[in-house]
Amino acid sequence: MAKADLTAAVARLEQATSTPELVQATRSLASLRDPDAAETLIKVLGFNNPAVASVASEGLIRLGRSIVPRLLVSMDARNYGARAWVVKVLATLHDPRGLDLLEHALKADIAPSVRRAATRGLAELEVNEEDTDSIRRCCESLLLAGRDDEWVVRYAAAFGLEQRLRNTTVPDSMVHQALTLLGQLASSSESVKVVRLRAQLALQLLNAP
Amino acid sequence: MAVTEPLNETQVIANLGQTTDPSAQYYAAWWLGKMRSRHPKAIPLLLQTLKALEQQPVDPERRGVALNAIRALGKLKSPMALTPLCELLNSTDYSVREEAARSLGKLQDPAAVEGIRRLLQSGISDAGGEQSGSALLREPCEALIEALGDIGLSSAETLDTILPFVQHPRPLIRAAACRALLQLTGESSWGIQLTEMLNHPEALVRRGALLDLGATGWTSAGPAISAAAVEPSLKLVALRGLAEQSEDPEVLKAMDALI
C-alpha cells in the first residue's frame, strides 16, 4: 500500500544527515507523487540546504495545484529562505488562489529573495481575461516591484512586466504605466546595469519605441 | 518594499561629520557607499574618519566607523581615496589591510598594484601561512589576490606573485587565485578549475567559487552556475557579473529562469 511507502520514505528522510543522504531521501519521497508527502516536502524547504530544497520544490511542483491550500499556510515567519522556496513553488504553479499571498509577500516581506519570487508569481499567475480586478492587482504589484530598493526585484519586475504585457490583455492606462516604468529601468536613471539590460530587452521584445 | 524610511542625504552628511555619536557615523558611512552618494562633502568626511586609525590605542568604535568608510570609499570609486587607501595597506591591523585591498580592487587604479603585490610576495608559506593561535592568514590573501584581478593590470611580476597561491591548502584562496589569473590572462583553464570547485562538498567553497566565476565575466561558466547546488539568490548575483561584462542575452535568459 502506498501509505507504507510514504511512512518509510519520511522515516528515511528523518534519519538522513549528510547532504547526499538528504537529497536521496527527498528524491524518493518526491517520486511517490503522493499529495500527503507535501507537508514533509515543505518542511524540507526550511533546512537551509539549497541542493535539498531544490529537489523538494521540484517534487512539490509535480504534485500540482492540489497542494496550493497547504502552501498558503506554510509561510515560516522566522525563515526567509524557506519562504522564498514556498513562494517559488506557488509562483510556478500559476494558481490564481496565490494572488493574495504573492501580493502581500511583495509588499511586506523583508527578504529580497521572497519579493523576487513573488514578482515572478505575479507575472505568471493565471488570470481570467474578464477578471479585470486581478489583472489590475498583478500589474500594480509589478509596478511596485519596479521601484524596489533591491536590484534583483527590479530585474524581476522588468521580466514580469514584459510577461504580463505579452500574455494578458491589460487596460491601456496600465500598459502606459508599465512602458513608462520599463523606460525608466532601461535608462541611465537606473543604477544597475543588468536591470537596464533586462528592461531594454523587454522593450525590444514588446516592440516598444 | 524594504522597510527602511528613505534617509535624507543632508542628515547623513551631518551624522558623519559629528563625532559624539559613533553609531550614527557608522551608519552614515555605510549609507553613503550604499547609495553611491555624490555629495561634495562625502569623500572628505569619509577620509577624515580614517584618522582614527592613526591613534594609539585605536578606539574600537571609531575603528568600526573607519572600516565602513574604507568600504564606502571603494564603492564611491573616488580617485582621491587612492593614496590614503594605499597607505592603509601598511597598517598593522589585518582587517584594515583587507578592506583597503578590497576597495582598491574596486577603484581599479593600476597605481595600487605594486603595494598590493608587495604584501603577497613572500608567498604561500609566509604571507599565506596561518597566524599562530588564529584562523587568519598572515596577510588577507583572498582580498589582495582578488584586488589584483579586479584592477586587471597583467604583468609577469603580478602573474608570478599570484601563481603559487593556486596550490594554497585553503580552497577559497585557490579560488581567488584562479579567478585573478582568469581575469588577467583570459585563459580558460583557470575558469575550468574554478568551475570544478562548484562541486566541492563544502557549501562555503561552492558559494565562493560561484561568486568568483561571476566576477570574471567568463560566460562559459553560465550553465555550471545555473546548475550549482547554491542558493538561487547567489546564482543571480554571479550571473549578473557575467551579464554586465558580456551583455550576452543568453545570460539574461539564464537569470530569468532563476527568478
Image (tube, coloured by chain):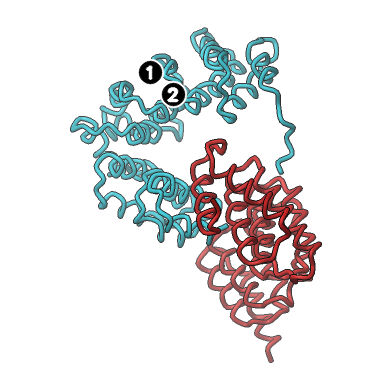
Looking at this view, is A90 or A78 the one in front? A90
The span from disc 2 to disc 1 (Cα, nearest Å) is 7 Å
Q: Badge 2 is on which residue?
A: B100
Q: Which amino acid does label 2 sit on?
A: Ala
Q: In this view, does B175 lie above or below B9?
A: below
Percent from the top left, x then y, of residue B55? 52, 7
The answer to whether one can see residue B60 in this image is: yes
The answer to whether dots 2 and 1 both sit on one chain is yes
Q: Is residue A107 above or below residue B138?
A: below
Q: Are marks 2 and 1 in contact (CB under 8 Å)?
A: yes
Give the chain ID for the cyan colour.
B
Q: Badge 1 is on which residue?
A: B86
The residue lying furthest to the bottom in this view is A1
Does residue B198 appear to the left or right of A105 in the view shown? left
Along the polypeptide, which appears first: circle 2 or circle 1?
A: 1
Does residue B80 appear to the left or right of A207 in the view shown? left
- Label 1: state its secondary structure: helix
The residue lying furthest to the left in this view is B156
Looking at this view, is A138 or B17 the one in front? A138
Looking at this view, is B175 or A7 the one in front? B175
Query: Residue drawn 50% across and 53% down?
Result: A201
The shade of chain A is: red
Percent from the top left, x then y, of residue B254? 47, 59
Query: Residue drawn 50% across and 28% down?
Result: B75
Q: What residue type is labelled 1?
A: Cys
- Label 2: state its secondary structure: helix
